[in-house]
Image: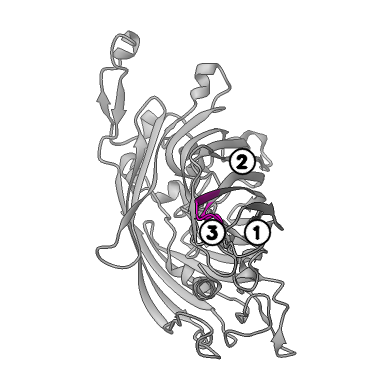
Amino acid sequence: MGTRSHLTVGAICLFALVLVSTNSFAIPAFSRQYGTSCSTCHVNFPKLNDFGKAFKDAGFKFPKDDETFIKIPPVMLGAPAQKEMWPHTIFPGMIPGLPPVGLRFNTFFQVVSNNRNNFNLQSPGTLDGQQFIPRTDFQPGLFSIFMAGNFGSDIAFWVDDDLSVGGSASDGGLGDGYLKFVNIGRFLKLPTDALSLRVGQFELDLPFSPARSWNLSGWDIYDQANIGSANSLFPQQQNVNNGFALSSAAQGVEFSGGHQYRGYHYSLAIVNQNTGGSASGGNNVPPVVTYVSDSNFKDLYARFAYRFNLERDPASRNEIQAAGATGPRDHTYLNFGTLYFYGRSVQRFQGQDLAANPVVLTAREPFYRVGGDFSFNYRTFNLFGQYLYGRDQNLLPVFPAGINPNPTGFATGSPAHFSGGFLEADYLVLPWMMTIMRWDRVSSTADLFNGIGSTPDSDAGSFVSPLHSTRNRFTPGIQFLIHANIKASFEYQVRPQQIVYAAGTTQRLTNPFRTNSAVAGLEWVY
C-alpha cells in the first residue's frame, strides 16, 4: 500500500474506530443456571468484579460449593460410579442442564466535528480516494451469539461468533473458541490452581481485555500495528509491514496459574503468527511483495502480575467479595503487571536476477512488544493504566548498482517502533451509573512515514515538525444500566486539530481538521 492510501485510511480510522464495537460480552446463560443477577459477577457488564474474576478463574463455576448454588442441575454423561472403574470405562462428564446460549446486539449514533471534511484536497490529485464523512450517522454494531460453561472435571469451554458491522447478510467470524483445563497442576501435586491449560482460539491474556471492554471505543495502543512500508520519498528508511496487534485473536495453547482476584497470576502462550500486511509500492521496491506467516516458528507471549489486597481486616483480604444489597463492592487493592510478546514478521520478495532467473528472498524480521500496567481500586473507584513499547527489526532490501530493479539481500535499518498507552478512571456513582475519564496516547514511526499525526502550531499557523508523530485522545463518558442486561452509553472523544503532510516534508495535503466525536450506544444481552 502506498503512502497516499495510508494517508486516507489513517485519517479516517482515527475517528471511524468508534463505530467498530469491541466484542464485549456478559454471560446471561450463567444467570439462568444459577438464578442470580448479572451484577453478581459484573460491576457494569462486561466489567468483572472480584467474584466474576474468581468465577472465571474456576472455569465458569462458583469457586466454592458450586453444586449447592446451581439452580438447573447439569445433565450427567455417565454414572458417577464410572470414575472408580476408569480406565476400563469412559470417564463420566456432564453438560449444562440447558443450552448455555447468549445473544447480544448493540447500535450507535455518532456526531462528528463540523470541520471533519477539511481534509479535502488543497491541490487536486495530491491525495487519492477523497472521503465524505457525514455529520451524523446511525450505525449498527455487532450481533453476537456466544456460549460458555463447564463440562465437569474442571473443563471449561467458550465459543462466540460475531456478525460484523454493515447490516444484513454481513459475514460472521469466530471470536474465541477454546477448552480450558483448570487446575491440572493437581496431577503433578502442585499447589491448587498453580497450572491450567487453554487450547484453541482465544484473546491473549492482556491486563485489560479489548474483546470484553466496557468502553464504546477500544484502547488505541492494543490496536496498534507497525505498518510503515517504503514510499517514494523515503524508500530505504522503513520497510516494515507487520499487521499484528495485541488485540488480535491468537490460535495455540496457553499455560496459566494463580488468580485474577488476589496474589500472583501468570500466563505463557505459544501461538501462531498473525502478521499479515499489504503490498508496498514506490521507488526501489521489488515487483511483488507478499506477507506471510512463518509456519516453522511460533510466537511467544508471557504475562506476570501480582495483586496486593489492602483490606484492613486480615480475614477478608483473601475472601471473594460479591455484590451486596447496595451493589458491587470489590476489595481495595493495588495490582502491578508486565507483559512480553516475541514474534517474527515474514516478507517474501519475488523478482528476477540480471539473467532473468526467478528469485525469491525471504526476510524474517524479529519483533517484540513489552509493557507494564497497574490497577488501583478503592471500593467503587478504579484507576488503571497500561504502557506499551513495540519494536520491529526493519530489514531493508539491498539493491545492486545498475539497472537490476530486484534486491539481492537485506541490511538492518533503523528499528521501527511505537510507544504509548492509556490511563483510565472509572467511578461507580450509583450501582447502575458509571462515569469514565480516559486518556490514550500513541507515538509511532509508522505514522510518521505515512504522514499521519502531525499537528499544526495554532499560534504560528504552521506545523509541528513532521519528524514527530503522536496521536492523543481524551475520552469522557457515562454509562447507565437501564436493567441489569440493558445498557446505554455515551462517550465524547477529543482529539487535537490535525494536518496531513506529505511524508517528511512541509507540504500540506489537507486543510486543518478535527475528528472529535460524540457517540451514544445502546446494547442488550440475553
Disc 3 marks which amino acid? Asp
- Residue 223: numbered disc: 3
> Residue 286, how many percent across, how many down?
54, 61
In the image, the segment drawn in magenta is: 348-361
Is-magenta flag for residue 353?
Answer: yes
Upstream in sequence: badge 2 or badge 1: 2
Q: Secondary structure at mark 3?
A: helix
> Residue 48, how many percent across, how many down?
49, 49
Residue at x 67% of width, y 62% of height: 401
> Residue 99, how many percent across, how many down?
26, 41
Give the mark toward the camera: 3 or 2.
3
> Could one spot residue 393 in this view of the protein?
no
Q: In whole angstroms, how far apart are the C-alphas of marks 1 and 3? A: 37 Å
Give the mark toward the camera: 2 or 1.
1
Residue at x 41% of width, y 82% of height: 136
Looking at the magenta stretch, what is its main secondary structure? strand
Residue at x 34% of width, y 14% of height: 83
Of residues 334 and 287, the one drawn nearer to the viewer in this rendering: 287
> Could one spot residue 407 in this view of the protein?
yes
| Colour setup of the view | one colour
Answer few, some or many: residues within 10 Å of disc 2's Cα (few below 14, many 20 plus, some between 14 and 19). Answer: many
Judging by the rendered image, the residue that carries numbered circle 2 is: 303
Judging by the rendered image, the residue that carries numbered circle 1 is: 400
Which quarter of the picture shows residue 472? bottom right
Q: Are marks 3 and 2 in contact (CB under 8 Å)?
A: no
Disc 2 marks which amino acid? Arg
